[in-house]
Amino acid sequence: MIAPAQRPDARRHLLGIGGLSPQEITALLDLSEAEVAVSRQTEKKKSVLKGRTQINLFFEASTRTQSSFELAGKRLGADVMNMSVASSSVKKGETLIDTAMTLNAMQPDILIVRHHSAGAVALLAQKVACSVVNAGDGAHEHPTQALLDALTIRRHKGRIARLIVAICGDVLHSRVARSNILLLNALGAEVRVVAPSTLLPSGIEEMGVRVFRRMDEGLKNADVVMMLRLQRERMEGAFVPSVREYFRYFGLDAAKLAHAKPDALVMHPGPMNRGVEIASEIADGPRSVIEEQVEMGVAVRMAVIETLLARAEGNT
Ligand code: NCD
């Protein structure tokens, strides 16, 4: 599912954080810094991707990720087309490949793909001639989210190595958690996950994280508190007794945040369920960097698209 480093064409895709070296991650973060500066200028447009075509192919509804990729492509000078496919769960494989082949015939240079099934984006990448970016596949990976989170952290803390990062909440259904665990471990952070047993994938310890089932213990001395959305749309049956109960034990409020370091950052990938996994006063409070994460998202996506196309065109 993850692009193996030995596959000769793997470098023209970004299918996951798995398969990236720490050096490659750092290079993407460094280029993202330059893209932040571009986005803060009055004239926000580069011409590196002039004449290139980017297609955003979203099989799952998305507002922020799709618009972030759209702006990223446009700021690089590409022509961007959005395709939202309301996919039926029947004949999924066929639909996916058919759509891929149709788009491939239109000669795009890069495809940004979100799909509700883990592995679907990697499968599609094998069928098309252009670069592919995984914008989230099921509960598998969401690599640009982990990169934008790392960029946000690095800009505040100056580094990733040796920071204590607590990832809290619905780890079971979260591609954001998986990609973050891989990236933060690759760059030498101490990663913790904090969740009720029902929301922890079995064997999560094997990913190199410490597991906590209580917020006070998991947040102790944390430099970063990363909250996850309770993904109720992915749940069949009762994973949590009630939303009120969940907030009481796992929702981030002032009392729980007091266990983290006084200068701890509060993060959330969005969209937030206020009053479910995070209290409004914390989401809008002085330690929250949630809006900044959105800004970093555009910059990171610019860096990823620019890097992949430079490789595909043999410029690196
Ligand atoms: C995340 C996703 O889709 O995986 N959101 C996002 O990319 N904006 C997290 C989530 O949906 O909870």
Image (cartoon, rainbow, N blue to C red):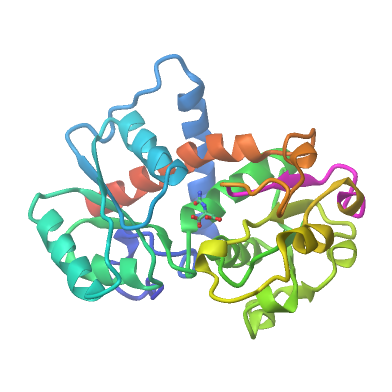
Q: Is residue 74 visible?
A: yes
The majority secondary structure of the magenta stretch comes to loop
Image x and y of residue 54, in percent: 24, 43
Place residue 53 in its image quadrant: top left
Q: Is residue 126 left or right of residue 289?
A: left
Depth check: 309 or 205 in front? 205
Give 162 or 197, whichever is nearer the viewer.
197
Q: Residue at x 27, y 62 (%)?
A: 87
Q: Is residue 168 visible?
A: no
Figure quadrant of residue 100? bottom left
Q: Quadrant of residue 91?
A: bottom left
Give percent across and percent down for residue 11.
33, 62
Locate the N terminus by quadrant.
Answer: bottom left
Look at the picture and state if 240 lies above or below 248: below
Task: Relative to 42, say whether 312 is above or below.
Answer: below
Q: Position of residue 23 (x, y in %)?
A: 53, 58
* Outermost top residue: 42
Counting labels gives: 0
Start-end of magenta stretch: 257-270
